[in-house]
C-alpha cells in the first residue's frame, strides 16, 4: 500500500490540485453570480419564487446526467475543464442564492425600518446593516455549496476534466479498489476540511443578540 | 412655516396603499381606511401625544411624517414642505426616530449605534466618538462604561436610553417616538419618562409620541390627540384631559382610575 501511494504520490498531488482548482473557480463564479442575485431578489420580491425555483431545478439534475449531457457537445475538446466548472457553478448557485435571500429577509423588520428612518440609502442599508447581519447565514450557504461542489467535482472526471474523480473512474474501470480509495478518501478529506474551515468563519461572523 | 413644524392636511391612508406611492382615492374617504382625513397642526417645540387603541392609526400617522408611510390623499407638511415631494433621505436625516425595544443594531457597539446618524452624514470618526460620548452622558449612560459595549450587554431600559441618544445624534428639529417604553417594566418606564421629559424641555424639539398609555401621554405631552378608527376623536391640552366631557376620553380616564372608583 505504501509502495502504491509512493508510486502515485505525484499524480495524487496533481489531481488534488486540479480538484481544488475546479472547485475554487466554480465557487468563485457561483458567489459572484448568486450573492448579487440574492440581494436583487430581496428588492424584487415577485421574482424570488421563480428564480429560486429555477436554481432548485438545476440542483436536482443528477450530476452524472449533467456531465453526460455535456459530453457530446462538439466543441468540448480542451474546454472540458471550463465546462466542468460551469456545471459545478450550477450546483453551487442554489444554496448561496437561497441563503443570501433568506438571510437578508430574516433580519428583524424593525432594524430595516430604523435604517430607513435614519435616512440610509439602499446601498448604505445593504453594507452597514443587511450584509453584516446576514453574513453568517450567507456563509452557511457558501459552506453547503462548497461541500457539494467538492463531491460533485469527482464526477467531472467522467468528461475528462480531471480531478480526483480520475482515480475513482480508473479504479472502477480496472476493478482496482486501491484507485477508488485513492480518489475517494482525499476527496472526502477535502470536503471535511472545507466544511470545518468555513464553519469556523461562519461562527466568527455570527452576531450575538442574547445574553 | 418654521423649521420643526408639522402639519397634516386631510390625510387619508387606505389599506391597500400601505407601501406604494400615493394613489388618488376618488371622492370621500371610504370606511376601512387606516386614516380617514386627519388635519392637525403641531406647534414647534411642543410635544404631542397620539393616543388610541391598537389599530386606531396612530403609528401610521406618525410614519407619514418621515415618509415611511405615504398618504393616499392629503398632505403632510414638515417645516412647510410637502413630504411627498421631499427627498426622503434628507428629510429622514433631519428627523429622530425611536421605536420599542429592538431598534439598536446588534452587530454594532452602543457608541457606534448612537453615532450612526453622524456616520451616515460622513462625519470623521473622532467627531463621532466625541459626540457619542456627549449623547450617552445626556441620557445618563456613562460613556466610559457603555460606549464599547454591545446591545445585548445592556438592560432594556439602558438600550432605550441609547435609542433616544441615537435619535438625537444629528440634532434633528423633530423627534418621533413610537411607543418607546412599551416593553419596559413600570419602574424603568417611569425613570425613562422622567428623563425624556427633562430632555424634551431642555432641547425644545417638536416631538410626536405614539402611546396607548394615558398617563404617559399626559405626563410627557403638552397636547393629547385621541385617535379612533383613523379619525381624531378629541384634541386636548394635556391638563384638560382628565376633566374632559368627551365620551371617548372619559372612557380612557375611567380605565385609568378604575382602582379609585371601585374602592
Image (cartoon, coloured by chain):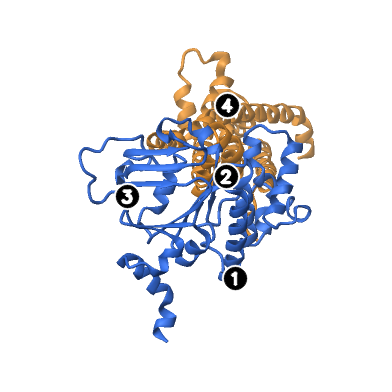
Q: Are marks 3 and 2 on the same chain?
A: no
Image coords of residue B93 (percent x, y) = 56, 37
Chain of the residue that carries numbered disc 3 in the rendered image: B
Chain B drawing hue: blue
Element class at badge 4: helix
Q: Could you classify mark 1 by the number of other residues whose Cα lies within 10 Å: few (under 14), some (14-19), or many (20 or more)?
A: few
In this rendering, position of residue B176 left or right of residue B137: left
Q: Position of residue A57 (x, y in %)?
A: 41, 35
Image disc number at residue A137: 2
Quarter of the figure with residue A195? top right
Disc 1, SS? helix
Q: Are marks 4 and 1 on the same chain?
A: no
Q: Nearer the viewer, mark 3 or mark 2?
A: 3
The chain letter for the residue carrying disc 1 is B
Q: Which chain is orange?
A: A
Label at residue A37: none
Residue identifier under label 1? B187
Camera-near label (2 vs 4) is: 2
Amino acid at each position: 500500500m505504501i509502495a502504491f501511494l509512493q508510486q502515485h504520490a505525484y499524480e495524487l498531488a496533481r489531481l488534488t490540485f486540479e480538484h481544488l482548482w475546479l472547485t475554487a473557480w466554480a465557487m468563485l463564479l457561483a458567489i459572484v453570480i448568486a450573492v448579487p442575485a440574492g440581494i436583487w431578489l430581496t428588492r424584487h420580491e415577485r421574482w424570488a419564487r421563480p428564480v429560486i425555483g429555477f436554481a432548485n431545478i438545476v440542483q436536482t439534475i443528477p450530476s452524472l446526467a449533467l456531465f453526460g449531457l455535456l459530453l457530446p457537445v462538439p466543441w468540448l475538446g480542451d474546454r472540458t475543464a471550463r465546462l466542468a466548472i460551469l456545471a459545478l457553478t450550477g450546483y453551487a448557485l442554489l444554496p448561496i442564492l437561497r441563503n443570501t435571500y433568506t438571510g437578508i429577509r430574516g433580519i428583524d423588520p424593525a432594524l430595516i425600518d430604523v435604517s430607513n428612518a435614519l435616512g440610509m440609502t439602499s446601498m448604505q442599508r445593504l453594507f452597514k446593516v443587511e450584509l453584516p447581519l446576514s453574513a453568517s447565514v450567507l456563509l452557511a450557504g457558501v459552506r453547503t455549496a462548497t461541500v457539494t461542489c467538492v463531491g460533485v467535482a469527482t464526477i467531472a472526471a467522467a468528461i475528462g476534466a480531471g480531478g480526483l474523480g480520475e482515480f475513482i473512474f480508473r479504479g472502477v474501470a480496472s476493478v482496482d479498489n486501491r484507485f477508488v480509495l485513492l480518489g475517494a478518501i482525499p476527496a472526502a478529506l477535502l470536503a471535511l476540511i472545507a466544511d470545518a474551515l468555513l464553519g469556523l468563519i461562519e461562527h466568527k461572523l455570527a452576531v450575538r443578540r442574547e445574553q | 412655516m418654521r423649521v420643526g413644524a408639522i402639519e397634516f392636511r386631510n390625510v387619508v391612508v387606505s389599506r391597500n396603499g400601505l407601501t406604494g406611492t400615493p394613489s388618488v382615492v376618488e371622492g370621500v374617504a371610504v370606511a376601512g381606511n387606516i386614516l380617514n382625513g386627519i388635519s392637525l397642526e403641531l406647534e414647534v417645540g411642543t410635544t404631542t401625544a397620539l393616543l388610541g387603541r391598537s389599530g386606531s392609526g396612530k403609528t401610521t400617522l406618525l410614519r407619514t411624517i418621515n415618509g415611511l408611510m405615504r398618504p393616499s390623499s392629503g398632505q403632510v407638511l414638515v417645516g412647510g414642505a410637502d413630504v411627498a415631494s421631499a427627498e426622503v433621505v434628507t428629510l429622514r436625516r433631519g428627523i429622530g426616530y425611536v421605536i420599542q425595544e429592538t431598534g439598536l443594531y446588534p452587530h454594532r457597539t452602543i457608541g457606534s449605534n448612537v453615532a450612526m446618524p453622524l456616520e451616515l452624514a460622513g462625519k470623521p470618526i473622532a467627531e463621532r466618538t466625541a459626540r457619542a460620548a456627549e449623547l450617552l452622558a445626556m441620557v445618563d449612560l456613562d460613556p466610559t462604561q457603555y460606549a464599547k459595549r454591545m446591545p445585548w450587554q445592556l438592560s432594556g431600559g439602558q438600550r432605550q436610553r441609547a435609542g433616544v441618544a441615537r435619535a438625537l445624534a444629528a440634532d434633528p428639529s423633530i423627534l418621533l417616538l413610537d411607543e418607546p417604553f412599551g416593553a419596559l417594566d413600570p419602574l424603568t418606564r417611569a425613570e425613562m419618562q422622567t428623563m425624556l421629559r427633562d430632555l424634551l424641555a431642555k432641547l425644545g424639539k417638536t416631538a410626536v409620541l405614539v402611546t396607548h398609555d394615558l398617563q404617559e401621554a399626559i405626563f410627557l405631552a403638552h397636547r393629547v390627540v385621541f385617535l379612533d378608527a383613523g379619525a381624531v376623536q378629541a384634541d386636548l391640552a394635556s391638563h384638560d384631559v382628565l376633566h374632559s366631557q368627551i365620551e371617548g376620553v372619559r372612557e380612557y380616564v375611567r380605565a385609568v382610575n378604575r382602582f379609585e372608583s371601585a374602592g
